[in-house]
Amino acid sequence: MQSVMRLLALITIVLLPSTMTARAQSSNEPTRSEIEIRGIVSIPSGTANFSGTSSGDTTIDFKRDFDFGNKLGFAGRYTYRSTNKKHKFLAEYNTTKWSRDTTLSRTFTFLGQTYIANLAASGDLRLNVYRVMYAYRWGTDKLRIGPMFDMGVVSTRIAISGTTNNGTRSGERTVTKFAASIGYDLDYEASPNINLFSNLGAIAFQGEHFFHTDNGARFYFTKHFGASGGYRFERYKLKKDDNFVTVRAHGPFFGGLIRF
């Protein structure tokens, strides 16, 4: 996994010099590079089983068992568009962590330990995603749409703990997988100061599923500064031997951006 991370980091670094070269060609050329920081309000759900069995009483349901609430996550994005707007590159990292203390409504098993109903327990769930994307788009100066391909790393972490008269029970598991998806990318210039966008990627392979989409608008107050907003949905199912974790998260996002 470290080699995969080094490869993705190298790809990102390779893309940056093209931005600086294009910028140096002419100060009158339109801006093609963009850095965006987002806040993402994520509403989570999903399931996980780390007991080596698919029996219902050992499958944790994030909504039923912990009812994780809405959480503000963060994302950083770098985008580069070629002069003719046909080629688009993107590097993105986003992270969200949910935590909740609750009283369990049922008994379940996690990593070989049984947590009984009415136990005071705490749960932590984290989702980290890093991806790089390339899209080739056809169209006009106002509308560009075409196929896209992305690859990256999806990492999930689940931790559960609870205290009984017999002591503390706790368990933690992290699953990290290389992920790739195919889909489409769209940009529509509604006006010189308003950009509407849509991006979707999905793939299913050997029982694992990867899906993400975000749709929204960018508003440019000046040539170099703007704001963004929209709605994002993502679903990842990762498998490890006989175990699995499925994380779904959706919600609105908002952010600020700089073009250069």
Image (spheres, grey):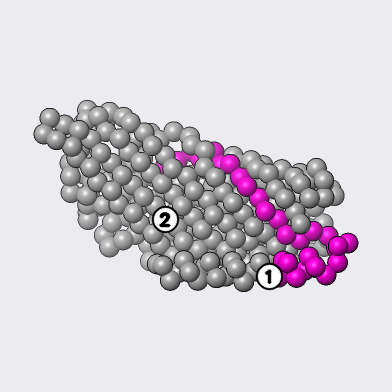
Give residue 98's position: percent from left, percent from top: 42, 39
Query: What amino acid type should be assigned to the residue bearing mark 2?
Result: Ser
State which quarter of the image contains the N terminus.
Answer: bottom left
Give residue 91's position: percent from left, percent from top: 60, 60
Residue 37 lies in the magenta stretch: yes
Q: Pick out the residue farthest to the right.
A: 28
Residue 194 seen: no
State which quarter of the image contains the C terminus.
Answer: bottom right
Indicate left or right for 249 with 18 as reference. Answer: left
Task: Look at the picture and state if 102 lies above or below 55.
Answer: above
**For mark 1, does the 10 Å Cα neighbourhood hold few (<14), some (14 to 19), or many (20 or more) residues?**
few
Indicate left or right for 214 with 242 as reference. Answer: right
- The secondary element bearing badge 1 is classed as helix
Residue that numbered label 1 is attached to? 17
Give residue 118's position: percent from left, percent from top: 22, 28
Residue 22 seen: yes
Image mark for residue 155? 2
Which contiguous range is marked in magenta? 17-45
Cβ–Cβ below 8 Å for labels 2 and 1? no
Return the residue nearer the eye: 37 or 49: 37
